[in-house]
Image (tube, grey):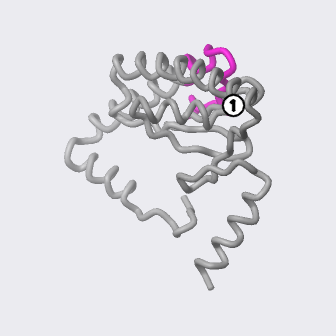
Amino acid sequence: TNSFTGRKSGNITLMTWATIVLNGPKFYKRLARSINDTTFELATNLNKIPHVTVIGNPCDLVNVVAFYTDPKICHISGVNHFLKQKGYNLNELQKPDAVHIAVTENHTSEEFKKQFIIDVVVSVREAKLAQKEASEKGLPTGAAIYGTSQKISDSSIIDKVARNYLDLLYS
């Protein structure tokens, strides 16, 4: 994946190879199946949460579940804010504003899957309330800049900020 600072290294490929060499192909296939099943289960359960929509069909041999909320009800960056307070570290996306979780072996336990869905439900409720309060006070809710941990209140300037950053980085 390309990012502002360049391409990620081949560590994912290396770790996959090392896992297969160390544990054998049967272990790797069982692990891959478990991750794929977890991806399907998380996507299915996230789609059941009011105001949450899963993007695409993450059950087609991928391990990433991206989702967004109805911004009129609660902005996904608000939901992510409350999920961070609960210890999650989801990546924020743009166009549409969304977050995604890359499912790994750490996420395959029944305890994690159940708690994650509960925490998303609670975070949507918290973000809905916070957005309502901010709206009543005339405060902006913000938008994320992909590839950074920053938020801005005016999403219309993201393109200009990104171009300026790249100009500074490569000039």
Specify few, some or many for label 1: CA neighbours under 10 Å numbering under 14, 14-19, or 20 or more: few
Residue at the spot of label 1: 134
Picture quadrant where residue 34 is located: top left
147, above or below 73, in the image: below
Single out the residue that lies furthest toward the bottom. Answer: 171
**Of residues 50 and 129, the one drawn nearer to the viewer in this rendering:** 129
Q: Amino acid at mark 1?
A: Ala
Q: Position of residue 13 (x, y in %)?
A: 39, 56
Q: How many marks?
A: 1
Q: Is residue 138 left or right of residue 29?
A: right
Q: Position of residue 5 (x, y in %)?
A: 52, 69
Q: Would you say residue 51 sits in the magenta stretch?
A: yes
Q: Position of residue 147 (x, y in %)?
A: 56, 56
The magenta region covers: 43-60
Q: Residue at x 63, y 19 (%)?
A: 47
Q: Would you say residue 45 sits in the magenta stretch?
A: yes
